[in-house]
């Protein structure tokens, strides 16, 4: 290797080191620059996502010391049940598209990341053949009734502490009612929706 080739190799190594340093430092500096530009350039910027807040002032002085608890399983079904009469399975099919990433809704459909959901209404919890349920789900007991499905689909981690389901839940009661109406159609003998 002659002197020219060695110089070329050293230049390549130096260039690679500089590129790596820029790749590490430049993104952080661009973020800092954009934040400073927003604050000093006349444009207000806000980083991240603002979480909705409970209006504790409206709840009185006693409520200001604590945050209101989330609705319990019975509370969510009490909210959803009156909506079931007007629930639209087609609307629930749209919501189910999110579920379909992990669950099959087809008759005879295979388990995926989550168990197949054909015939889920009325099925014993944690009982789909061939699916490895969490111990928490296997120990839940009972059947998937509409009130239990509403509570689970609204907040899976609260309803079955220790569930493997990573989905955060359906918070909108109307969408939850539509989803329950759709799940009722996934059966050869649909369980009637409660009135």
Image (cartoon, rainbow, N blue to C red):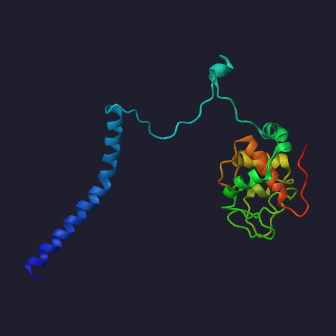
Q: Outermost residue toward the left?
A: 3
Q: Is residue 96 visible?
A: yes
Location of the C terminus by quadrant is top right
In percent of width and height, residue 74 lies at 82, 39
Q: Is residue 61 left or right of residue 15?
A: right
What residue is shown at x 76% (from left), y 48% (from top)?
152
In percent of width and height, residue 15 lies at 21, 65
**Which of these two is toward me, 143 or 150?**
150
Q: Is residue 164 visible?
A: no
What residue is shown at x 83% (from left), y 37% (from top)?
78
Q: Does residue 58 sit above or below 171 in this rendering?
A: above
In percent of width and height, residue 49 lies at 51, 40
Q: Quadrant of residue 129?
A: bottom right
In percent of width and height, residue 55 lies at 63, 25
Q: Does residue 119 sit above or below 48 in this rendering?
A: below
Give the mark count: 0
Q: Quadrant of residue 24?
A: bottom left
Q: Does residue 187 sit above or below 32 in this rendering?
A: below
What residue is shown at x 80% (from left), y 65% (from top)?
128
């Amino acid at each position: 290797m002659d002197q020219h080739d060695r110089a070329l190799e050293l230049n390549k190594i130096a260039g690679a080191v500089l590129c790596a340093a820029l790749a590490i430092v430049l993104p952080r500096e661009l973020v800092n620059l954009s934040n400073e530009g927003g604050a000093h350039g006349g444009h207000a910027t806000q980083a991240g996502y603002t979480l909705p807040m409970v209006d504790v002032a409206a709840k009185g002085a006693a409520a200001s010391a604590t945050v209101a608890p989330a609705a319990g399983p019975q509370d969510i079904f009490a909210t959803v049940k009156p909506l079931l009469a007007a629930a639209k399975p087609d609307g629930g099919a749209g919501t189910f598209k999110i579920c379909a990433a992990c669950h099959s809704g087809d008759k005879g459909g295979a388990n995926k990341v989550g168990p197949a959901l054909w015939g889920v209404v009325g099925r014993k919890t944690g009982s789909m053949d061939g699916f490895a349920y969490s111990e928490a789900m296997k120990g839940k007991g009972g059947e998937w009734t509409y009130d239990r499905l509403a509570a689970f689909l609204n907040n899976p981690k609260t309803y079955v502490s220790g569930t493997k389901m990573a989905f955060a839940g359906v918070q909108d009661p109307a969408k939850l009612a539509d989803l329950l109406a759709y799940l009722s159609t996934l059966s050869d003998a649909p369980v009637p929706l409660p009135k």
